[in-house]
Amino acid sequence: MSSPRGSAPAQHSFWGVERAQVVQVVGECHLVDDPAAWPRGGPEHDIFGDDDLGVTSLCCQCGRLYLRIRRRVPSEIWYFLIPVTRSEVEILIARLAASEPSYTGRWLAAEGEIVALASTRPFLERSDNSPKVLHWKGPGEPLAFKFAPW
């Protein structure tokens, strides 16, 4: 669903957001026009993880910092890349540490922080389910959190 490297961006790579809005947030990151170059490997820092929700900070090839979110909902797994700053990652880590120490407390804190960040900036959404999804979404577009694990 992405454009080949070096060609014009595919219109369907943006859902509820314009290319210029994404560039305003992420700069010249290669993922703007080539979302299929989803970051793999590199320095990663696991922030929160369980069977239903995984939160990892990572840098893409161009050095842009993202939160990679893995969200399992009934029989599907969705992934999101949310552009963040180092200070936002530090705040997220501190808020998780200060949350209620139970599984539910930490899960709800992680979900709340992720939804709050995604409501203020474009983010990249991917699903390998049928039909496959890979596009930038606008701030405030729903994440796969409509299904709670309990």
Image (cartoon, rainbow, N blue to C red):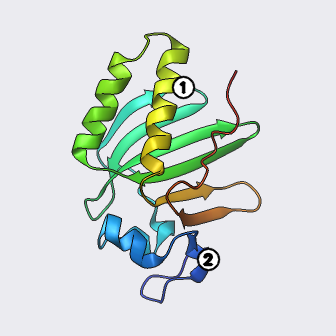
Quadrant location of residue 64? bottom left
Which mark, residue 109?
A: none
Residue at image point 49% right, 68% down: 35
- The C terminus lies in quadrant: top right
| Rendering coords of residue 142 (x, y %) | 61, 50
Q: Residue furthest bottom?
A: 7
Category of crowding for the residue at label 1, using alpha-carbon neighbours closer than 10 angstroms: few (below 14), some (14–19), many (at least 20): few
| Rendering coords of residue 125 (x, y %) | 56, 57
| Rendering coords of residue 121 (x, y %) | 42, 57
Camera-nearest residue between 94 and 125 = 94
Residue at image point 57% right, 66% down: 135
| Rendering coords of residue 87 (x, y %) | 22, 42
Q: Would residue 40 be visible to someone looking at this image? A: no
Category of crowding for the residue at label 2, using alpha-carbon neighbours closer than 10 angstroms: few (below 14), some (14–19), many (at least 20): few
Q: Could you tell me which secondary element the residue under label 1 belongs to? A: loop
Q: Could you tell me which secondary element the residue under label 2 belongs to? A: helix
Which mark, residue 50?
A: 1
Q: Is residue 57 left or right of residue 124?
A: left
Q: Is residue 133 left or right of residue 43?
A: right
- The N terminus lies in quadrant: bottom right
Which amino acid type is marked by label 2? His
Q: Is residue 130 above or below residue 107?
A: below
Number of numbered discs visible in the structure rendering: 2
Residue at image point 72% right, 43% down: 76
Residue at image point 61% right, 77% down: 12
Q: CA distance from mark 1 to mark 2?
A: 32 Å
Q: Would residue 70 be visible to someone looking at this image? A: yes
Give the mark nearer the N terminus: 1 vs 2. 2
Which amino acid type is marked by label 1? Asp
Camera-nearest residue between 35 and 95 = 95
The residue labelled by disc 2 is 12
Quadrant location of residue 37? bottom left
